[in-house]
Amino acid sequence: MAATRRRKQGTPVGVEQGAKRVFAWALDWPGWCRSGKTEEQALEALAGYLPRYQAVARQARIALPAEAAERLSVVERVEGSGATDFGVPHEITAADREKLDTDEARRRARLVSAAWRLFDQVAAGAPAELRKGPRGGGRDRDKMVGHVLGAEAAYARTLGIKLPAPELGDREAIEGLRKRILAVLREPSDGEPLTPKGWPVRYAARRIAWHVLDHAWEMQDRSEPQG
């Protein structure tokens, strides 16, 4: 019922307010999440990334209307922490603790899987040496891929999955970890974490997809020559 009420208001959005950074994310679209120095900037960034996120929705074969960015409606705000300012949408919200039925769980899992496919496609087409960031920093391609794989193994533990981080290029291990994660994300949930100090399934899906896409989009941007 809560999700139905939210949709009537437009595209439901959550906001995490840190001291120096603010995150905004679409509650029903795992991975469609951006940040800014203020809530207004975060919402503007979120709207601006709709075309890029639509590529994920297309991979998942889920329709995402072009007008979704025109009807952003903040339905929950949560106070952030040092992790927020560091650059992570860290806080678990009331919306993250809502129940998930089978259809919605599978829909979200499809979007997470699509985020992985997009990341793999971007990495396959990216140069080994990426253009440096504005301050001369940033990981190159293989280090970025390794970072994402290591993070996913850590995220999996919050769902009760204990597997080592796959080695770079070990497709069998990578696919094995992802299949285990998706098997959990596809199941209906009562909103409670599956392990002590673990993550609710809704939060796990949005956090995993955010991290994958954040680096996929960074890799895309840093693969382009400086113009």
Image (cartoon, rainbow, N blue to C red):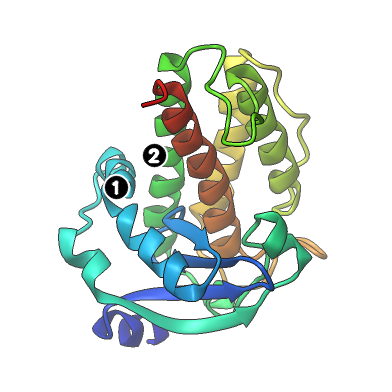
Q: Amino acid at mark 1?
A: Ala
| Label 2 or label 1, whichever comes before in sequence order | 1
Q: Using a 10 Å C-alpha cutoff, classify the residue at mark 1 as few (fewer than 14 neighbours), some (14 to 19) or many (20 or more).
A: some
Q: Pinpoint residue 215: horizontal percent, then vertical percent.
A: 54, 37
Q: What's the CA distance linking mark 2 and mark 1?
A: 7 Å
Q: Residue at x 72, y 56 (%)?
A: 86
- Is there CB contact under 8 Å for labels 2 and 1? yes
Quarter of the rendering occupied by the C terminus? top left
Residue 57 tag number: 1
Looking at numbered disc 2 in the image, what kind of residue is underneath it?
Ala
SS category of the residue bearing label 1: helix
Report the residue that reaches farthest toward the right: 196
Q: Give residue 204's mark.
A: none
Say which residue appears at 75% left-offset and 43% top-offset.
Answer: 154
Image quadrant in which the N terminus is located: bottom left
Q: Callout 2: 10 Å neighbours few (<14), some, many (20+)? A: many
Of the pair 81 and 160, the residue shown nearer to us: 81
Place residue 19 in its image quadrant.
bottom right
Q: Which numbered tag is attached to residue 114?
A: 2
- Taking the spot 63% from the left edge, 27% from the top edge, the residue there is 144
On screen, residue 63 above or below 167: below
* Residue 44 percent across, percent down from the top left: 36, 65
Q: Is residue 96 visible?
A: yes
Secondary structure category for the residue under label 2: helix
206 lies above or below 4: above
